[in-house]
Image (tube, rainbow, N blue to C red):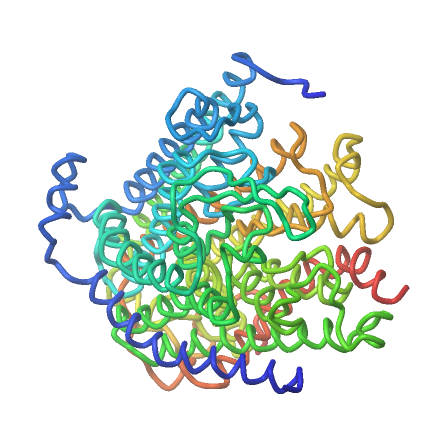
Amino acid sequence: MNAILAAVLQILGLVGALAFSVPLLGRYLAHIYTSPKHLRAEAVAYRALKVDAEADQHWRSYAMSALGFSLAGILFLFAFGRLQNLLPLDGGFDPLPSDGAWNTAVSFVTNTNWQWYSGEAATGHLIQMAGLAVQNFVSAAVGLSVAAAFARGLARTRNQGRIGNFWVDLVRTTVRVLLPVAFVVAIVLVAAGAVQNLHSVHEMTTLTGGGQALTGGPVASQEAIKELGTNGGGFYNANSAHPFENPSPFTNLLEIWAILVLPFSMAWAFGLIVKDKRQGGAVVATMGTLLIVGITLLTWAEMAGPGTAPQVAGAAMEGKETRFGEAATALFAAATTGTSTGAVNGMHESLTAPGGGVAMFGMMLGEIAPGGVGSGLYGMLMLAVVTVFLCGLMVGRTPEYLGKKISRDEMVLVAVYILTTPILVLVGAAIALTAPAGLAGLSTDGPHGLSEALYAVTSAANNNGSAFAGITSGTPFWNTLLGMLMLLGRFVPMIFVLALAGRFATANRLPANSGTLPTHRPLFIGLLTGVALVVVGLTFVPALMLGPIVESLS
Amino acid sequence: MRVWNGGVSDLIYILLTLMCFTGLALLVGLIDRRLGSAEAAADDVPAADETAGVNVPHDNFIPGAAR
């Protein structure tokens, strides 16, 4: 089949699957986050945690609960990594070094899943199952919970800053959404050929008489939540390019669907929670527009972009998923950098210069196309507030979003939210590119070396986790720098989001009138898309000029 | 060669984590105090005044707005 036709059919198949599943899952999510009833298993969990499930938390308590839960997760996972050689199913591996254990703990708790190590060569089955996979579930649940709290803040009026109960949101998301959906996806992956066992290394003899070590493990179960929770940390170093994680074109498409379905569904659920489906539809449409642009540009860059390989061979195949074709890698890369996933089915370092630039730009957008589970929605809603504010400035009216007046205090929160990640990325890149220990980790110099460092700090601060894998990041310098960026990039914006949610929950809802900017029409979708591109463009184009853009032109 | 290893480096990373989360908790408190005082100030304004002029052009001046 013609490669372009295959690429188009693949995208159409994905769009069809999402169009079918997003409204269903969105409705289910909205029900979960608004229902007053608890399941029996959930009630047991609340009793065990000594949680008053009926308490409606102030945004401050909600934020402190999320922070406390995440702090406990980091300390637990850090201890797990340092003590793994003393625990069962350690696979004979040494404990992770201090800096590596800390980086891994922060990485998985912040939903980043940056991996400085090779999964199959450094971590045993127990830490994979009881440490990393558990964080894959609960870190995703934290993101979804915060997004649900933000939607509730917009839906409520005069509620003294109360936005729900973090523990109820966390438990419901895990028990009712992530566990059942991940279970089904894991079963499908096993049926399609992914590995699921507790075996250690098998020594094999190849046809030519050579030796090969094949590592087994609980791969399919980890793979399912890795994609659904937009986590991305692979059981194997090759991630989804490994045939045991991603055995066929069908599983490849299934994994891309799993990456995208929850972020889009949460945006759909948002419309239902605020009791205006059109608002959710507008957010989904904006996310979808940005994603389609990203997929198109990346596919073009890899199949027909500048460079000898795409021009002569028809595609830049080095380092790519040769089993499924270049378009499959381009689609996977756009999905994984448009969300906060970081899973890969090819090496992003091997993307063409413009392709790598598109992948980086996807992360720099704040991962709102459609973004991480939960974080994509609240990131997009922050930009929606900026958009109504700018429109208010243009026509001289008081801006409002969903009937909530946007005054100085709201805009201060949104502005510091928007500024936080770029500051982390650019300051982090400056540190990495001036410190000898940072430069020592780069595989090359010149524009591509700068791209390696810029990609790493962008990935960390935006909680993505993918890498230009030529970089050697398993050093104390890189582990500490990226760990700090992941931690601050996750929780500082989250605090501003929850504060704004509390502010909205306290405010009155103003009735719409002829001066109200409709936020569900194509005009607003266009404005929101434009604002996202302009804000990111103004912030990051100078850095991109020095890396992928110069490399494209050279 | 790794520079850090062992108990001291473990302690350093644990302290770094605790310091970061202390900072985040302080940020929560700071924002809450600031928003709390803003809300108290807003509560002093009669409810009718809060909404009466909203969305009426030119009565809510926004610095820099096009006119």
In the image, residue A415 above or below residue A402: above
Choose between A381 and A214: the one closer to the eye. Answer: A214
Residue A44: percent from the left, percent from the top? 11, 42
In the image, residue A212 above or below residue A299: above
Q: Quadrant of residue A230?
A: bottom left
Choose between A204 and A65: the one closer to the eye. Answer: A204
Can residue A484 be seen here? yes
In the image, residue A434 above or below residue A408: above
The quadrant the C terminus of chain A occupies is bottom right
Q: Is residue A540 left or right of residue B65?
A: right
The total of numbered circles placed on residues is: 0
Can residue A161 be seen here? no
Choose between B25 and A179: the one closer to the eye. Answer: A179
Q: Residue furthest right?
A: A554
The quadrant the N terminus of chain A occupies is bottom right
Q: Residue at x 74, y 49 (%)?
A: A452
Q: Is residue A69 left or right of residue A356?
A: left
Q: Residue at x 29, y 77 (%)?
A: A276
Q: Is residue A405 left or right of residue A288?
A: left
Q: Residue at x 34, y 41 (%)?
A: A66
Residue A433: percent from the left, percent from the top? 78, 40
Q: Residue at x 45, y 79 (%)?
A: B57
Residue A415: percent from the left, percent from the top? 53, 55
